[in-house]
Amino acid sequence: MQYLGEILSLVVAVMWTATALFADQASHRIGAMSTNFFRMVFSAILLAGLLWIAIGHPYPAYADGKTWLWMGLSALVGYVFGDYCLFNSYIVIGARFGQLFMTLAPPFAAIAGWALLGETLSWRSWLAMAVTLTGIAISILSRSGDKHHLTLKLPLKGVLLGIGAGLGQGVGLVLSKIGMQHYAAALPADAPAAFEWAMPFASTMIRSLTGTAGFFLLMAVSGMLPQLRAAVHNRSGMKYTALTTLFGPFIGVSLSLMAVQYARAGIASTLMALTPVLILFPYALIYKQKITPKEVLGVIVSMTGVALFFLL
């Protein structure tokens, strides 16, 4: 099907917009760590069921050690570090601004691709990064005082968490790409035909299992395990966590891996990065918050940077 990758990328952007809204609600109810842990557990269960139906095995069949290594690393960077930062940024600055910082993911991905895969990073790429950063700056900086000093209108903690989220997402995507290359190389000649579309879901299951272990270990070390029991009894929080799982690591992430198989990585990444635009108006309606023209301009400039980065 022509433009399948581009269509999937747009679907992913919508999925991630819904995920951000649901995750914002869940994180405020049961905490970012509990939300992430149960999100990983639910994701692994859903993916196991899907793989069982598709290929007859409720686990990522044919994945070798290198596949597990690179997909596991992508989970630790993208899920445990990146999503820890992202979900906590929702609590501090809200999903609208948290998603704005996710426009940093494509530039971070390109830098990681240069460092890990030897991909070219031209002067145009640096220009596009500058445009993206300018857009973010327009949204989060304001003038105050008689001397018109520029100051952050968001808490510094939230800004740092947002940057960490973009870093984790971008680097995690590159590590996933490496992992899927190893997965494709490990497939035997007699692998089921369904694996052509099921491999991204199997890859996501490896990430979910690693993410589950990573979040559990973090909570155990920090003495937060009792929060899991309390979270189970919060029906509203668990409902939003389940919706976050469905639209995020189950459908969204899997389709994002599928999208890069059928479209140029640059085009797919640019389309998937539309979430900060798509989230503006539903977020404003739900939380009854005013969106200023300056904030809209900042998002547009930042998205222009993302587009320039990949499409030049």
Image (cartoon, rainbow, N blue to C red):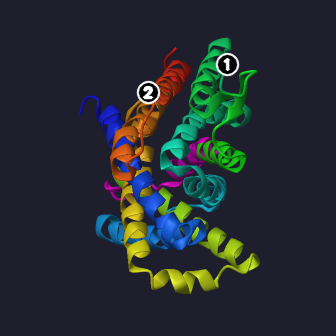
Lower sequence index among marks 1 and 2: 1
- In this rendering, the answer to whether 224 lies above or below 275 is below
Q: Which quadrant of the structure image shows residue 166?
A: top right
Q: Can residue 227 be seen in this view?
A: yes
Q: Is residue 47 left or right of residue 123?
A: left
Circle 2 crowding by C-alpha within 10 Å: few under 14, some 14–19, many from 20: some
In what quadrant of the picture does the N terminus appear? top left
- Estimate the spatial distance between the alpha carbons at disc 1 and disc 2, rounded to whole Å: 18 Å
Q: Where is residue 164 in the image (x, y as percent from the top left)?
A: 67, 47
Q: Where is residue 261 in the image (x, y as percent from the top left)?
A: 42, 39
Q: Position of residue 115 (x, y in %)?
A: 73, 33
- In this rendering, the answer to whether 280 lies above or below 23 is above
Badges 1 and 2: C-beta atoms under 8 Å apart? no
Seen at 63% across and 26% down, the residue is 133
Amino acid beneath label 2 = Ile
Q: Position of residue 60 (x, y in %)?
A: 47, 65
Q: Which quadrant of the structure image shows residue 54?
A: bottom left
Q: Can residue 202 be seen in this view?
A: no
Residue receiving disc 1: 126
Closer to us: 112 or 57: 112
Closer to us: 276 or 57: 276
Closer to us: 298 or 142: 142
Mark seen at residue 267: 2
Residue that extends furthest to the front in the rendered view of this protein = 146
